[in-house]
Amino acid sequence: MVRLITHNLLACHVRGCTTNNFPLAFKDVEIQLREAEFNQDFLRGFLPKLEWRALVDTAKSLNDQSLPDTPPAPEQMDTEFLKALHHVLLEIHVEEGAMVCANCGHVYPISNGIPNMLLQEHEL
Amino acid sequence: MGRKYLIYYAIAHAEFRFPELQSISELFGFQVSLPDSEEDRDPTRPFMIVELDEDRHARLLAQRCILVKAIYELLGEGVTYEQLHASTKSNKSIWDKYQQNSFRFEVTAVNHTIPSERKVKIMEDFEYMEFQGPITLADASVVLTYFEEYPIKHTLRKRTEGDGDFDRAFFGRLIEEGACRSLKHKFDVKQRVYYGNTTMDAEISLLMANQALAAPGKLIYDPYCGTGSMLFTSAFFGAMVFGSDIDGRQMRGKNLNPPGIFQSADQYGVLNRILDCCTFDITRNPFRTGGILDAIVSDPPYGVRAGAKRLGRAKERPVPRAPLETYENTTSYVRKPYELGDLTADLVLLARYLLRPGGRLVWFLPTASEEYQDVDIPVCEGMELVANSEQNFGKWGRRLITMRKSTNCPEYPPPSFDPAYRMAELGDQATAPSGHRGFREKYFAGFKKIGDSSN
């Protein structure tokens, strides 16, 4: 777990950390690839909510180059594109490692696929 | 004009019956017409006749409604035996197309046992239907069922006493047996590989998934997911689910790898539909944006078995500017109690932010029965109440609340989880006394009125 779709929704939320707090950078990751059910409606419905640049860059940081730098227009999304998007969003699982904020440096550790997004008292 | 169908209901959760029927018909986009008279709609009785457009809709209801035992095409009804047969004869055009099919006949009663001699006689009395197909017990293509409904007698008696003295009788062709039995068994908590002391029972968590309109292509979130019971049933119905909890230990279990919540998901074959589970406090959440969810389904902690907590220090004191050395690699985070009245108000405001327009919030509100009033339900601009069903435990009860985010509303900002914001959005409701504010204290005081010193 920690799929890239989740990663694309999470920003650093330390008090006062409001700029350059997204996306979080993966660090020391251990990755597993696991097949997921392909559902076009889910992907199309979610696409407008994605931060595309962050998704592409993050995928590249995990050695996946399959996504184009700009998303195609909705009527030009072919199956090939949707399959690639499906794979990046749902089939790459970061099991161990951490997510680090580029702005404040807060480290959100990931263990057994569950990220710890809690904050310490001085960060509230 | 619709066709008449007989729904045979489980006698449980009467108040949940109509909301569920409504939700499932909305989910699949068809109409259910309820009977006109109040008496025929009585949700404490086992039978209800509805009108549907086609058999397929009846099948969908049977497959999804947790409270439905079976659905039949209505062939006859009556308050007397003669009336039932007259009604059946007049409906010949509905059943004469099955005269050559293989068939099976069932005779049964609710709150009663029909003696076997009379059972045989009842079957013979339907001779006028002239069914000529082979009688097969195992895989008949048509199953005809005759029901008698008796009043509940709260006395010890023989099951056959008062035979024939029924309230109503029904005769129908089986469309589909309800999936409820097998689903309740499938999600039985006792059979689950990993669960905790606040895990929701199977039937209710299935009902909640139905209220949330769980289906493939949707994203559903539980902000107090604990051991994950809400996630599994929604995922089973095809939705992608996401969970978070302030206490990661609930999700992980002690020394379990993979974490317990993933082990249970795997048991139900839905591991791939668990989008992710994260440890965070919902009042200090990391969501980058709102408007992303199709539903939020949750049983928030109400302080009896699990105390509601949020990050922060209960008593004011100078905040250390940097973490203490010992904080490194530990899991000690300061927490303070989270009052249920505040929690519920925040939940509704959070849902308004995170849901897509038209998305649903389904949650349990525990209340002291005597103090509850309908105005207790927090409502704000942009969120409307869909259903409110009580499960009564005597002095207290819990209400399954279903709300919907309005379809044409602006985007709302993330809530700030503080008293000023609640006050601004909910007005007096944010602080007014209610059947759930201070629930923990009321519970442990045995729901005695303030100043009541008896016992």
Image (cartoon, coloured by chain):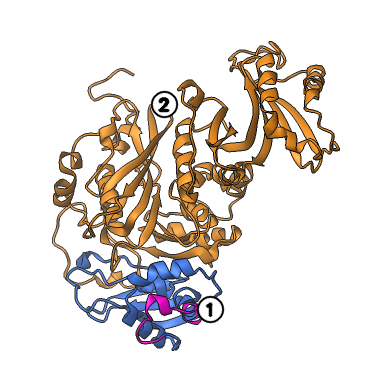
Residue type indicated by callout 2: Gly
As drawn, the chain in orange is B
Identify whether B273 is placed above or below B372. Answer: below
On the image, the x and y values in percent for residue B291 come to 31, 61
Q: Which residue is drawn at 52% across and 78% down?
A: A32
Q: What element carries label 2?
A: loop
Residue identified by numbered label 1? A33
Q: Is residue B316 magenta?
A: no
Split into 4 quadrants, where in the image is the C terminus of chain A? bottom left
Chain bearing mark 2: B
| Neighbour tally class for label 1: few under 14, some 14-19, many 20 plus, Cα within 10 Å | some
**Could you give the CA–CA distance between mark 2 and mark 1, rounded to whole angstroms?**
50 Å
Give the color of chain A as drawn.
Answer: blue
Kind of residue sitting beneath label 1: Leu
- Is residue B109 at least partly visible in the picture? no
Q: Which element carries disc 1, helix, strand or loop? A: strand
> For residue B108, what is the image quadrant?
top right
Number of other residues with Cα within 10 Å of mark 2, as a class: few under 14, some 14 to 19, many 20 or more: few
Q: Same chain for marks 2 and 1?
A: no
Q: Position of residue B216 (x, y in %)?
A: 50, 60
Q: Mark 1 lies on which chain?
A: A
Q: From which residue to which does the magenta span run? A: A68-83
Instruction: Reply above or below: B186 against B67.
Output: below
Quadrant in which residue A21 is drawn: bottom left
How far across and down, in percent of the image, does residue B410 sit?
22, 58
Mark yes or no: residue B439 visible: yes
The residue lying toward the viewer, choosing from B347 and A122, is B347
In the picture, measured across the screen, residue B439 lies left or right of residue B155, that is left
